[in-house]
Image: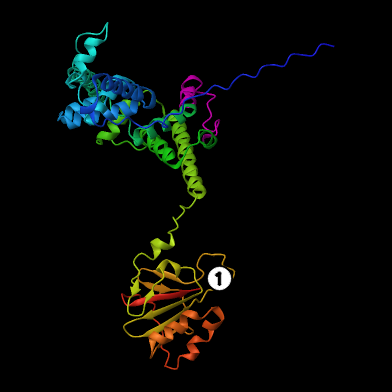
Amino acid sequence: MAIPKAKKRKKPIQRRIKGQIQEPVFENIEKMTGAEFHRKRMYAQEFYRMEKDKTDYKKYIVTWATENNYSKDDLKYIKSNPDFAFNASVGGLARMFSRGVPDEHEHPGIKEFYESMPGLPDEPKPALPWLKDRIQDLIDDGKEIVDKKIEISQTKKKEAPPKSIQERLRDSSLNMIDPIEDHIELYFDENDKWDPTAINITQILRRAECKQAHARIIKKYYEDFSNDYKILVGPKKKECEEWQQVQEAYSHVNKKTANNMIKFHDLINQACDAIIIEQKGNRKPRKTKEKSAEELAKKFKFLKIDNKLGLTSLQPSDIIGANEAWVFNVKTRKIGKYITNNPDPMKLKRPGTGLQIKSNTITGFDEETSEQKTLRKPQDQLIEFGKLGKVGLRKYMDSVKTTGIKLNGRGNENTLILKVM
């Protein structure tokens, strides 16, 4: 049995990764020979071609133009060109000039190098005029782009303005009543057989997804026709100008037709009222945006730090939702304990539980159990207070022998927030 030949593994393609090569640095140019300076420039140009992209070229050209006092309009025109308009030759050259690299023909040994190389001219052409010509091309192209954008925007302004919300609402409302209008026209074709109740107007409007605003517009639209028919069959008022106009406009309509139309328009009116009432009942109440604890407590006044006691305050937002809060007034030497009247022992953050803050006042605390007492030696007593845990804090107020007084919940610039639980 023949042994199968082993397949040769293809060597993986080595791909270049951009950003691993450092940008060339031109140092001691005056010590370089013409050949060295020429090769250095060629290497730099190749670096910008391979390692940079069109967005970099655009940035280099704008930077060089800014350094060379091009006008704001020219810079705007350059920037308005798309990225593909910027190439490595122009971008790389602009970058080298920005970094202080001299033009090739300015190097003292370059002419000798060119003369020694067969097939090259006696000396290189200056690159700066060529760069300026290319940048001028970008300015000209950019100006055309800007002018075209201005022309388009002016054309759009001259066009008819878009319909307002009210106009669009009216158009959509009138589209909903096509079946109703068809039924009205049917009356004049089949006068004897026509029945005002033959169509369910409410159902038609519901199928058309008629909202309150649509129903009001439809109701108003048919209201004028209904009033005209009522005037037509009502008492004669020959001296009334409106009565005369209605008689003239509806001279082709007899009394039976007018009464049928009044009945039909009453049904339209009832259907619109039903839609309006339904929509009011179905409307969801607007959700109130819940404010964060930081927003609720932003107006609360407190002392951030007391250097004498070496204490730093907690944030007022920490009080919101807490079951207990300890404060200390550095001016009156009073330590206060706020206890909520609606505790949240499981910390479920139920709405309305715990202490709250409204403007500059702590709310939701029990006025009977919450109290404040004066510390005779705050420096020592607060050090002891800071060491206490949850269990120790329960008996701390009893250990302070001064008289307890009620708290008012107000914040001020002398109050530190010591603990929150």
Q: Residue at x 45, y 94 (%)?
A: 401
Q: Is residue 183 magenta?
A: yes
Residue most extreme to the top: 119
Query: SS at mark 1?
Result: loop
Residue 372: in sight, yes or no? no
Type of the residue with mark 1: Asp
Residue 349: in sight, yes or no? yes
Q: Which residue is drawn at 29% across and 27% down?
A: 58
Q: Eyeballing the image, is 380 above or below 319?
A: below
Q: In this view, does 322 lie to the left or right of 3?
A: left
Q: Residue at x 24, y 29 (%)?
A: 62
Residue under numbered circle 1: 344
Q: Does the magenta stretch include residue 241?
A: no
> Quadrant of residue 135 in the image?
top left
The residue closer to the viewer here, 196 or 199, is: 199
Residue most extreme to the right: 1
Query: Residue 103, position in %: x, y?
Result: 20, 22
Classify 10 Å Cα crowding around label 1: few (below 14), some (14-19), many (20 and above): some
Query: Residue 127, position in %: x, y?
Result: 21, 18
The residue closer to the viewer here, 115 or 394, is: 115
Query: Residue 303, position in %: x, y?
Result: 33, 73
Quarter of the picture holding the N terminus: top right
Query: Residue 342, position in %: x, y?
Result: 52, 74
Q: Eyeballing the image, is 326 above or below 12?
A: below
The residue closer to the viewer here, 389 or 117, is: 117
Q: Which residue is drawn at 43% across and 37% down?
A: 214
Disc count in the image?
Answer: 1
The residue closer to the viewer here, 100 or 366, is: 100
Q: Colour scheme used in the picture? A: rainbow
> Quadrant of residue 35 in the image?
top left
Q: Give the range drawn in magenta.
A: 181-201
